[in-house]
Image: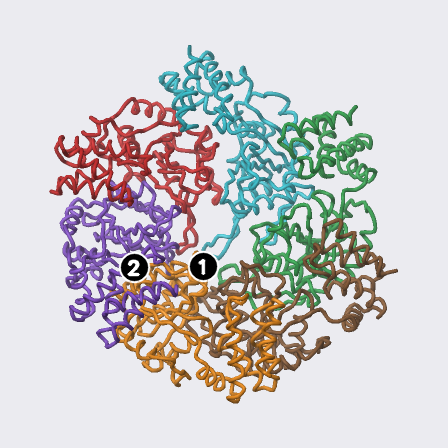
Chain colours: A cyan, B green, C brown, D orange, E red, F purple
Amino acid sequence: MILDSHRITTEPYYCAAGNEIALFAAAYAARMPMMLKGPTGCGKTRFIEYMAWRLGKPLITVACHEDMTASDLVGRFLLDANGTVWHDGPLTRAVRHGAICYLDEIVEARQDTTVVIHPLADDRRVLPLEKTGELITAHPDFQLVISYNPGYQSVLKDLKESTKQRFAAMQFLYPDRALETAIVAHEAGIAEEDARRLVLIGEAARHLKGHGLDEGASTRMLIHAGQLIARGVALAAACQVALILPITDDPDLRDALTATVDACLR
Amino acid sequence: MILDSHRITTEPYYCAAGNEIALFAAAYAARMPMMLKGPTGCGKTRFIEYMAWRLGKPLITVACHEDMTASDLVGRFLLDANGTVWHDGPLTRAVRHGAICYLDEIVEARQDTTVVIHPLADDRRVLPLEKTGELITAHPDFQLVISYNPGYQSVLKDLKESTKQRFAAMQFLYPDRALETAIVAHEAGIAEEDARRLVLIGEAARHLKGHGLDEGASTRMLIHAGQLIARGVALAAACQVALILPITDDPDLRDALTATVDACLR
Amino acid sequence: MILDSHRITTEPYYCAAGNEIALFAAAYAARMPMMLKGPTGCGKTRFIEYMAWRLGKPLITVACHEDMTASDLVGRFLLDANGTVWHDGPLTRAVRHGAICYLDEIVEARQDTTVVIHPLADDRRVLPLEKTGELITAHPDFQLVISYNPGYQSVLKDLKESTKQRFAAMQFLYPDRALETAIVAHEAGIAEEDARRLVLIGEAARHLKGHGLDEGASTRMLIHAGQLIARGVALAAACQVALILPITDDPDLRDALTATVDACLR
Amino acid sequence: MILDSHRITTEPYYCAAGNEIALFAAAYAARMPMMLKGPTGCGKTRFIEYMAWRLGKPLITVACHEDMTASDLVGRFLLDANGTVWHDGPLTRAVRHGAICYLDEIVEARQDTTVVIHPLADDRRVLPLEKTGELITAHPDFQLVISYNPGYQSVLKDLKESTKQRFAAMQFLYPDRALETAIVAHEAGIAEEDARRLVLIGEAARHLKGHGLDEGASTRMLIHAGQLIARGVALAAACQVALILPITDDPDLRDALTATVDACLR
Amino acid sequence: MILDSHRITTEPYYCAAGNEIALFAAAYAARMPMMLKGPTGCGKTRFIEYMAWRLGKPLITVACHEDMTASDLVGRFLLDANGTVWHDGPLTRAVRHGAICYLDEIVEARQDTTVVIHPLADDRRVLPLEKTGELITAHPDFQLVISYNPGYQSVLKDLKESTKQRFAAMQFLYPDRALETAIVAHEAGIAEEDARRLVLIGEAARHLKGHGLDEGASTRMLIHAGQLIARGVALAAACQVALILPITDDPDLRDALTATVDACLR
Amino acid sequence: MILDSHRITTEPYYCAAGNEIALFAAAYAARMPMMLKGPTGCGKTRFIEYMAWRLGKPLITVACHEDMTASDLVGRFLLDANGTVWHDGPLTRAVRHGAICYLDEIVEARQDTTVVIHPLADDRRVLPLEKTGELITAHPDFQLVISYNPGYQSVLKDLKESTKQRFAAMQFLYPDRALETAIVAHEAGIAEEDARRLVLIGEAARHLKGHGLDEGASTRMLIHAGQLIARGVALAAACQVALILPITDDPDLRDALTATVDACLR
């Protein structure tokens, strides 16, 4: 089948923090367009992979960006030996053959990209291919999911009201201490004790958010530190490389973060 | 027939709020270019689908956006094995074969897109295809309809005076309480009582418009909440996911909206 | 003949307001480049159609816009089975075969579009096709006519002085009361009495220009109202749809306009 | 010969105002790059046509504009049945075959257009075709001439210092009263007496420059008025159409200009 | 093998300043995405070449810039005799065949370029080719490395938080006096004594950073001076040409730098 | 040989002002990337032509500009009868076959153009052709030379620090009085006495720089005046045409410059 390479065949590692699995399952049952909100690296992508596996549906993920055009999503004409031939884009493949289509950071894309999903995101569930004149009715399995990081957006760059109102939304946060410890230990392959220390450091770093830091350390960065530890790097050095140097160049903030790490190691 | 896939074969669900059906029928009889004004999700798209069904005419809908060019509407040359061949765009198909052409949120499009409709929107009713030199006289069944959301537009992005003056206009608002209750119950498949509660919540949310909310909850969002309820989600959780989380990230506004929901549930 | 579809075979309905017909005929005799000035919907397009019919010359009309390029006017290379072939644009067709070329709202076009007409708009009367190297001497019947709405232009977007000075100009205004009544009655197919009422309403609306209205009601909008009346819509409702809702979303202005209509109906 | 259509075979009508003919001939003898400065419609284009005729050289004129690219001047690859083939642009044709190349209003063009002429405008006299790798040494007859209207340019849009310094320059002004009368009479085909009146009106209008007028009436506009008079239009009406309506929409200025005309007619 | 020309076959000259070799080796063992931070010309590029040689992996370096598109990294369709054929870009070649891909000054690139690396820079390690529909799982040897100069970035142009957090980071500084002396002597082929003098001059110049200089003299510039000395240029002249004239046009700063050089030569 | 047309076969006229010939020869011996700094028309281009002749190497000159892309330098795919074929750009030809490549006014180019030279301007001396995947090691004769006019650059448009630091630099000024007199006499073919007068006028004009003049009269402009004198134009008229009219339109400055000329002629 055309979407076989987009099926997730082994269960992704996912620890639920609340009722999000049941809620999303109900939304999928109604094929309701969904928006996943939450900070970078808190697990939104992992969640949608887990749900695709659990629902047994193929998943097509598209990382959106400022220079993406509607054609990148919908498809385009390419020239071959017999002239121009239409090639479906990732969204069209999902619509036609029935996948969950996950548009990551949709707000980064140009407006033609966000408007092209409107007729898919209301009760019509159609995708007009303006360049071919075709009007595709979505496959019964198709669902549209987008992610959105509210901390990011400026007034100049936000979703249009008429886009937002087409989606229901779920809020994601960093996992609580026990859950995050289990995740870091599992993903980095380190001892619970080391993982617990990293999680405490991460929590401390997140408190500096707003005091010069755009965002604190994500779960993903804690896993990075853990992976270096698993390969023999000392915990303090691993925190420098994985948690502190990537997120700030301000000497005072670096000192504050280093002090935080030292305090947690004592 | 070339426009068969654009004919609406089953009656769309539409409850009239006033004399809009008779007015539009008179305008269609004169083939007058029409502008539908009103907020997001209040039913403009559904109305034009209903009128197309009632008048027995095909309907071609185009969602306009900032990066849309006149070529996306009118058509373009594509290369095949014998060289470049002209392909009609959606507007040209409507003009040539006689459909209602509905340009949704026309104000989002670039100016070449709005100017290209001028000779269709006065008594000439012609569409010059500048790239082919052809001058198409509109099919007798053709009518041009556009939508326009006055709440949106900035001074920088508005229709040109010479575009506006080519259209007659109709104003749409959210339906009144009884009508909206009937619509939500019908569309979500829930009990009247649940629908009535959602409508009350929606009305309360609309009062917050202007106090930090760009727009309140649309009828479409109330239907989303209803669909989740129909699949077993509790009313409070359904309102969070369908009404509150999508439209604001402000903690105070979220609290105010949650309090509104709680009050309506008591 | 190649321009046959651009010949106007039936006399357009036109009522002269002054000596404009004789003046334009003298200008055509000298093949002088002409600029028609005046507000939206006051009859400039109808006048040039009338003159083309009276002079027995084909008329090619181009609606200019921000994204129009010189190639859209002059022509371009297209690919067919034997390689690239030149296709004349509308201006080139008019120059080569002898038509009146009417560039509507030329000021909207990009500068390359306005500069391309310079050698046609002085005593050289040539059109250099830079892409083919051809230098076309204009057909003896060719004349260049542009329209220009002075109320519109900002400092940033105006014709270059070196363009303006190549044209002689004629000023158009809304017709006087008796003439406009005759036009509305004729075009909408309604009784003189109804037309007279609409004209009075239109005059009242024009007095609000400057008090929040960009432009008042044009003759075209009065005709719209008349056409709805001819199809059984009440005069007050017809004025709402055709005159008030299209031009303002300001509640106070809508009330003022509605009061104006009511006053005229009493 | 390839440039035959660019040879001027009949002597253009030109009345010298000073020593400009001898000066230009000396500059041509040194093949010095020349800049013609002066207001719109004062005769720069006619002068270069006259000199080309007098020197017996072909003349290639290019009207520059904001959207002109270096490729429009230099040439481009076009696709034909055997693949891409290079086509010389107007500048390259002049360089290769030996014409005077007149770039009208060069300052309007994009920078790539102005920089491309640098190696032609110093002692190297070469034109590198970057896209083909060819380095063309200019034909001995080739000369580069540009026009430049100092009244126009803003700080943002001016020639680069390194471009200006490659050119010697000549200043053009409107001709004096006697000379301008002769020109208007000759070009419009009217009596000396009528021409003298128009010239007096033109001089009066030029005095209003700076009092709201960007530029006064050019010689070209006086000729327009004369041509209408020659076709039977009254002098006052001809001045309205040819001199007043084209250059201002300000009612007070129009009144002042009309008063000026009336005074000259008394 | 397809990447043979990207293998480094002779050991690059590199003197370690600390534990950076071991740290990077641990990061490579985890295939962790790495960010190298530090000023221009301090040896980041040399370090990654050294590590690629030491780890025995091919290295593909891409100098990023403002006009680079995702296609420049990922690949594009090219037309040959049988139609369009896909050609891998440098990133895709590294991903498919297993190289270290070094994106130099990634922050200069457009957002589509930075977003395209996201799925490669988390635990998915996939590269979706949106234009072909292919989803490439990275070769086990692939690692992503980027460089980043914190001194440069403005608020307007910085990496997105969601990009930064995908990378662990290492900080590079100019080498200390002894090490830099050894490097300059080795690379320029001059005596230790001359190299020591240049290093002292370089240190003095770096102290002027912030007093009008954007950056002081880099190790690379000291090597330039040494190379001129090795070819017989006097030390003072070599410092003018290699250290002073390239970095400032301010007469006072030039004097201050010249005085610094003179002081070190005494 | 492919670069034969870029060899300079007759010795260019060049008078050294100091030790610049020896310095450049040492830099070429190290194949060091060089930056030539100095005002317009002071002889930078002539110097590099002279050095290319003296070193016996071919010279490829590229005039950079705002719209130049990396492809204009590096090369591009062109379509012929067998599909797309790669064509080397001027930089690639220099790199591959061993020429001095002189990028004139590099700062005018877009950033992709300046970044593309980075790997050529450090010890790697390679040029990656990203579009073909080829990595060209520079021919042993290749050297990169750029020019840079410090008087021009704004904060917005300057070379990046990481570009500047890759180059050693030489400063050029206008020649002193005796040398400039010799140059003007030689190039224009006039008597020493006339040349000396022009040089005195030029010096006086340069003192007005900063008092309203962007730059004073360059050596090139003095030669222009000389060439007109050699063809019989009077000295005062030649100075008007060659020195005054090209550089200012300000009446006061023109008067000041004319007075300067008159004083020197007395």
Residue D83 visible, this orientation: no
Q: Which residue is mark 2?
A: F216
Give the residue type that dot 1 points to.
Ser
State the image coordinates of residue C63 (x, y, percent, origin top left).
60, 65
Q: Please name the residue shown 48% across and 57% down the image.
A: A83
Nearer the observer, D171 or B65: D171
Front one among D116 and A2: D116
On whether disc 2 and disc 1 are found on a single subunit, the reply is: no
Depicted A124 relative to depicted B116: above or below: above
Residue E214 in the image, given as x and y percentages of width and height: 33, 38
The extreme bottom residue here reads: D191
What chain does badge 1 belong to? Answer: D
Up/down of E41 relative to D107, above or below: above
How many residues crowd mark 1 within 10 Å: few (<14), some (14–19), many (20+)? few
Q: Secondary structure at mark 1?
A: loop
In the figure, D253 relative to E144: above or below? below
Residue type, label 2: Gly
Q: Residue at x 54, y 79 (%)?
A: D201
Helix, strand or loop at label 2? It is loop
Q: Quadrant of the N terminus of chain A?
A: top right
Q: Quadrant of the C terminus of chain A?
A: top left
Residue at the spot of label 1 = D154
Mark 2 packing: few (<14 Cα in 10 Å), some, or many (20+)? many
